[in-house]
Amino acid sequence: MSGEEPSTRQATFNSQLATSNSVCHICGERADAGNSTVCNNCHRSFHLRLRNDAEGRDCGEVWINEQYLSLEFACFECLGVRPPAGQLAAEPPVGGGH
Ligand SMILES: [Zn+2]
Ligand SMILES: [Zn+2]
């Protein structure tokens, strides 16, 4: 059986089709409702894989607010994290306390 082919679809932007789709403000690419969410801090859309088995990129993080038992969404900008780029220098993880 042939496995899943890597997604090599070329991005085709149809500027003529003005839709209500939002744009990820982190990477600037279109973000659909299925692969993005809204930052709880800046209320702007960013990419987030809503399912672990789904393909997509993460331009932010999601975690569970244990106090309110709700999901918290935050984009990389609000988290102070650089968006994933093609060439990233190996930076040491931000750790503290020793
Ligand atoms: Zn993005
Ligand atoms: Zn944000």
Image (cartoon, grey):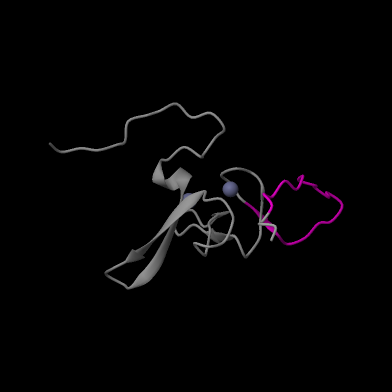
**Residue 56 is inside the magenta segment:** no
Q: Residue at x 66, y 56 (%)?
A: 4
Q: Quadrant of the C terminus?
A: top left
Residue that protrudes farthest toward the left in the picture: 98
Residue 19 location, quadrant: bottom right
Magenta stretch, overall SS: loop
Query: Is residue 8 visible to us here?
Result: yes
Q: Position of residue 25 (x, y in %)?
A: 59, 47
Q: Position of residue 87 (x, y in %)?
A: 53, 28
Q: Residue at x 54, y 61 (%)?
A: 37
Q: Quadrant of the N terminus?
A: bottom right
Give whichever of 21, 90 is nearer the camera: 90
Determine whether 96 is above or below 39 in the image. Answer: above
Q: Position of residue 21 (x, y in %)?
A: 70, 59
Residue 53 appears left or right of 73: right
Give whichever of 43, 13 is nearer the camera: 13
Residue that protrudes farthest toward the bottom in the picture: 69
For the record, the magenta segment spans 5-23
Residue that protrudes farthest toward the top in the picture: 89
Q: Position of residue 33 (x, y in %)?
A: 63, 64
Q: Residue at x 15, y 38 (%)?
A: 97
